[in-house]
Amino acid sequence: DDDDDDDDDEPFVVVGTPKKRKKRKRKAPQEEARSEALERIARFDLRPREVREHLDRYVVRQDDAKKVLSVAICDHYNVVRRCLADDSEKAAEYSKPNILVLGPSGSGKTYIMRTLAKLLGVPFVKADATKFTETGIVGEDAEDLVRSLVEQADGDVALAQYGIIYVDEIDKLCRGEQGPTGGAASAGGASAAGNRGVQNTFLKVMEETDVSVNKQSSMIPQIFLGGESPQPQRISTKHVLFIFSGAFTGLDARLKAKHAPKAMGFGIEASPEAETAPGDAPASFLKKATSADFVDAGLETEFIGRIPVRVAVDPLGARDLELILMQSEGSVLRQYERDFKGYGVDLTVERDAISAIAAAAAEEKTGARGLVTVLERTFREFKYELPCAGITELGCDSATVADPRSALDRALAKAANATREAVRRADCRRVEASFGRRHAPLTISLAPAAEDFLVAECAHAPDRSLRGLAGASLFDDGRAPARVRREMYFLVAAKYPSVFRGEKSQRRDGAGGTRIFRGEKSRRRRGWDAD
């Protein structure tokens, strides 16, 4: 009995010595291989002049802004490089050169920041200050921007903590920029209090703090379902660079009234030079703004005090907009040239047309964005008409900018009929190719009479495309002659004989060849019409 009990306690016998499994040691985070982007930051060796020269390729004017930003960026990422090379540097005290960029809409503030982020290869997040709330329950809070850096870095927390957060329209959080000050502003006391709360939420993330990669609300289901409390990853904001921007039009007007020279005496007018900056752009007085001016405008003292680098960009005049079209590597004119090239049209813009476009854009009062408005207005009809007209070259002069419709009519009148017919016959090949892609393995070809009919129909209806006529006028309303309709039946490849019926059906239909439809049941199954 005792032996039986022993057998029950040890029912299984292991033969041989079991091999111990070797546990793989997980590398510590600092031992894991760095991403390529992080290695590039670790090798940062740019100098301020080199950064400024890179910006010169894309951004016109704004010399002071480019110099200030180049120095601030190089200072910051030199510190980052030292931190990546030596962990002891991370513990050192560091005052970040957070940046405030002032200037009117369309002057290139966002474009400068995007160009810098591409040069550095760091995660870049842009947001508008108007979508933030103090609590983040409705809208977003400042910590959500830090989490967005992780998304931009494809989940690489180590890379995200050296990214750039750009917050535009920060002036909308200033009471002086939203309406009159004084008694009228007191009516919006609740809104002003909310704006102060939003500014306060930025104070914590602008300094050194750790932000959870996951929002607390995302962990609520796991808390109710039970289980161990998760330990979310955290990202440090010590080396996240914050850049704020805004138009501050109200502050600019107050500074102008304060600093602009005033004419004294009867019949004496102020000098026009005081109202206009070089390059026929209106003068800006934001460069004279001090911390006290920003506090008076509505920014909190603690908030503006954490933004030591402040720079104002200049408004853009007609001459500046000309230089953008001609010299900038990111010129929107290159985009329109590529757009027309996609239709087989070579666009050439004359020098007088560039001047006319820039002058019209300056009248829009939206800065560089006015260029897109004018170009779209000028070339909209050309993009619609030229691809079907067989025109392969388009020249744009000042007359085209002044009256695009008349210029288009002249271009269409000069187009040769032979060229248009060649385009239409090429469209017949596109109809055949499109049908083959949609209904493979069936292939089709248009009969010569059907092709001639389509070309003639396009000549009589220039406002219709050949593909539209092929799909509508010939098959739906039956306007084609009987002979043409018989020949319009698609000639299916001989290797698909199962789709044909027989001589009886062919005689009944009066078609001299084979027909692709077999019968009522087959037609319903395929979803084809009887005719």
Image: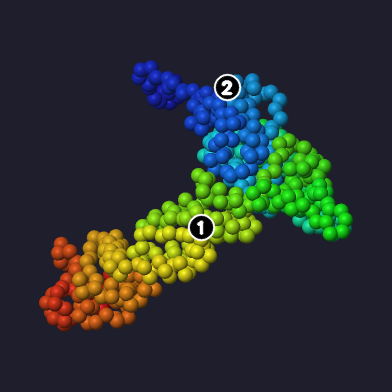
At label 1, the amino acid type is Ala
Within 10 angstroms of label 1, few (less than 14), some, or many (20 or more) residues? Answer: many
Q: Residue at x 59, y 26 (%)?
A: 81
Quadrant of res 189: bottom right
Q: Residue furthest top?
A: 17
Quadrant of res 202: top right
Mark 2 and mark 1: Cα distance apart in space = 53 Å
Q: What secondary structure is found at the residue carrying circle 1?
A: helix
Position of the C terminus, as image quadrant, is bottom left
Position of the N terminus, as image quadrant, is top left
Within 10 angstroms of label 2, few (less than 14), some, or many (20 or more) residues? Answer: few
Q: Which mark is residue 85?
A: 2
Q: Which residue is mark 1?
A: 353
At label 2, the amino acid type is Ala
**Mark 2 or mark 1, earlier in chain:** 2
Q: Tell me how many marks there are.
A: 2
Query: Residue 521 placed where, x, y %?
Result: 25, 75
Q: Residue furthest left?
A: 503
Left/right of residue 433 with respect to residue 247 in the rendered view: left
Q: Residue at x 20, y 71 (%)?
A: 448
Q: What secondary structure is found at the residue carrying circle 2?
A: helix
Left/right of residue 178 with respect to residue 380 in the rendered view: right
